[in-house]
Amino acid sequence: MARADLHVHSMYSERPANWFLQRIGASESYTRPESIYEQAMARGMDFVTVTDHNCMEAALILKEKYPAKAFTGVESTTYFPENGCKIHLLLYGLTESDFKDVQKARKDIYQLRELVRERNIAHSVAHATYSINGRLSLDMLEKLMLLFNVFEGVNGARSMASNTTWTAALRSLTPERMEGLKKKHGILPMGEKSWIKGFTGGSDDHSGLFIAKACTCADGSSPEAFLQALKKRESLAEGKHNDAKSLAFALYKIAYDFSMTESTPLHRSALSRLGDAILRSETGPGDEAGLVDKGGEEGQIRLLLAALSEDPGPDMGDPDPGLWLEGVYDKITKVSDAFFRNILLSIVNDLRQGNFDHCIRNFSSLLPGIFLSIPFFMTLRHMQDGRRLLEDLRGNYLDSRDYGKKILWFTDTFHEMNGVAATLREIAGKAQREGLPIRIVTSLPSGSARTGSDFSPETLTDLSTFLRFPLPYYENIEIRVPSILRAIQKLGAFEVDEICISTPGPVGLLGLLLAKLLNLPCKAVYHTDFAAQTRAITGSESLCDVVDNAVRLFYSFADEILVPSRIYMDILADRGLEPSRMRLFLRAVDTELFAPHDEARSRMMRQYGIGAGKILLYTGRISKDKNIGEILEMHRCMQAKGHNVHMLLAGDGPDLENLKKETAANPAITFTGRIPREELPVLYSGADLLLFPSTTDTFGMVVLEAQACGLPVFVSDKGGPMEIVLPGKTGEVLPAGNMDAWVMALSSFLRRMDIQPLTHARMRSAARKRGLEYSWENALETIFSGENTEVYEKADLPAA
């Protein structure tokens, strides 16, 4: 069989549709017609054509020069008059007279179809499922099925899903189905046996990189015979489908070609020198940062463009140029990561020095690096466009619609000991056990391989990072910044319906970016009050304002804001977030793990050297924002009142070592350090009361865990934990910062344990019952449907 790439562009396709090329002033292609012919023949094609947009000049040049091997072609832009939907129709073997008539008729697809039918012009509908101007629908596709009989089965610029779903839908057509479509749309099909469709393949190459990587196969020893096979629907499509990465390379290559034209200011500039450094591999490990510094903003852009100029050599003649593309992608990623790393390190240094104004100005320096990544962002979105249409096609023609909503869930914390991480580990575990379509995306800290190995790659994606640093003012928390381009490479192929975000850190920002790029619904969970924590830790109102504004901006981009408590809905509304977008995020606890444990008290007493008396417990981060100082003061007051009480504080944090030193002389105070989560139920079951005076928690996972284990809890009347506790039944809700009220309530509680032990037992039983109310079934319903989710209403909580 003979082969020909039936969809390829040349320098005569001048007007780019792509925003990136428009922005830099480039044309759509810089490939010479002669180069197309040479590459196509070298890669095994028997015939050659060029299909520029509404232009036949390049094709005429080749036909005149190679009459036995070339034939004319054009990609004609036409429109459905009823809604302006734009369609690209490939036409072949046209005379110049035919082309003039096509130009007149193409404004109306019905007139163009009649011209094609009357003159028996070889044709193929290009990338039919790609919505060129946002007006394509299933009805339009069905009309195309009636109007034409030949379609692109492999378009080298579209994804495998796009190509294969469309061809499968066309092959599923039957005489009965076509008759139904005819009645539905009132359009006569194109000729006899219109349910049998022919297929073509073409690279849709604009850059010169992928010419002949997709092609059409048909019998024919001459151009005329080959085109006759197309008309008879006796052609097949084969070759390479596309992905976002390959398409981005094509954009970079076009931009590089543009930079080398004599009419542009980029011609013969620093571009060549910087490009040579990469192309000849003269840079050693770590030299990317030096190139970044020397090149500046303009140099960065040129550096990435120049990397695409490397002569692909013989590898590009292979059926799959994947190795070459991987090498170029790796170079681009290293340079991009180095750029972002330098800027972010400067921002971190500004934060440490308290230079907030310069820090904000530094953020604007990220723009050139973002600009360098734009082709990858754009092509990722481009490849995802039309996914809903493909689902409609599958549902209506292939009966294989997948109704399970697929979710990517982004978080900056997963391994750590905090409520957010605990919740997400529970969700990941449930997703893995029950096959739920949820994938957690994070960057694990160094040395956390065991946590990652607990989950399959389908459940947990660990992103590679290019920068790790301790959070200023909170040095034991590590900020991990993922490589954007490596993340796109890892996540780009995952078919996702919705994005959830648990943290407004670097990983969360990546999730927000992907949601906007892919035009996906985005739910952001407001787990942590960072502004309140910043105020408590640093005492700096200016820094608190910076954090508050940044967090508010982040959540303003989410379609829905999931808030763990009603009281925090009020707080966020007061801070300026849109109340109509808030939903209550139901939380849950593993009530099999967090349950009363027999012999827990004796085990605790042996392990921590606790004698007779009452045991007060705190679990969580050991830091100022948790009001640990108040807990220690309560304990001191209880001892002063003659109560025999031991204070056990379980957790890690920035103030742990200092507080251990300060309390070392008191044997009735124990700091345990970090405790594995699976051992916490023993502490909850063995203690008499949990003290949790924090005012910055949006929910308070430890409060729920404690109650699930049957442990009463004292919480403050500020923040989310107050909604979990039933005052007088499972604990108490006490005035925040009012030490007298806390001391009085605690002293009364301890005395009541001695004189009314059954009251304490009933409280423990009520606490366990309260914990059982928080089921994972209800919590996950918040994510998958939102139907059982409370919308925002002003909280009406009983006074503590």
Image (spheres, rainbow, N blue to C red):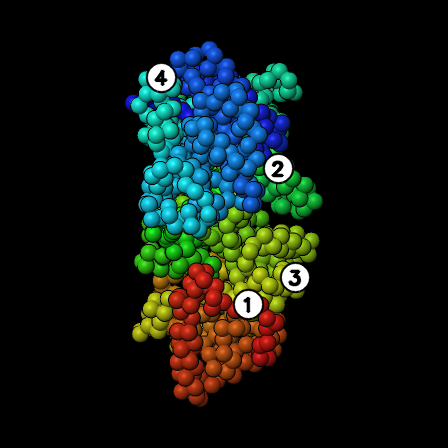
- Which mark sits nearer the N-terminus, 2 or 4? 4
Q: How far apart are marks 2 and 1 (CA)?
A: 37 Å
Q: Nearer the viewer, mark 3 or mark 1?
A: 1
Relative to 468, say whether 10 is above or below.
above
- Which mark sits nearer the N-terminus, 2 or 1? 2
Observer-nearest residue: 683 or 177? 177
Q: Identity of the amino acid at label 3?
A: Arg
Q: Say which residue label 1 marks.
A: 791
Observer-nearest residue: 401 or 304? 401
Relative to 632, say whether 730 is above or below.
below
Q: Say which residue label 4 marks.
A: 222
Q: Say which residue label 2 marks.
A: 367
Q: Identity of the amino acid at label 4?
A: Ser
> Does any portion of residue 418 appear in the rendered image?
no
**Mark 3: few, some, or many residues within 10 Å (few <14, many ≥20)?**
few
- Which mark sits nearer the N-terminus, 1 or 4? 4
> Does any portion of residue 93 appear in the rendered image?
yes
Q: Where does residue 158 sit, x and y in percent of width and height?
A: 43, 36
Residue found 56% across the figure and 72% down from its top: 716
- Which mark sits nearer the N-terminus, 3 or 1? 3
Q: Where does residue 706 sit, x and y in percent of width and height?
A: 43, 71
Q: Which of marks 2 and 1 is in front?
A: 1
Q: Are marks 2 and 1 in contact (CB under 8 Å)?
A: no
Residue 575: assigned label: 3
Q: Identity of the amino acid at label 2?
A: Leu
Q: Where does residue 447 sit, x and y in percent of width and height?
A: 39, 46
Q: How far apart are marks 3 and 1 (CA)?
A: 17 Å
Q: How far apart are marks 2 and 4 (CA)?
A: 53 Å
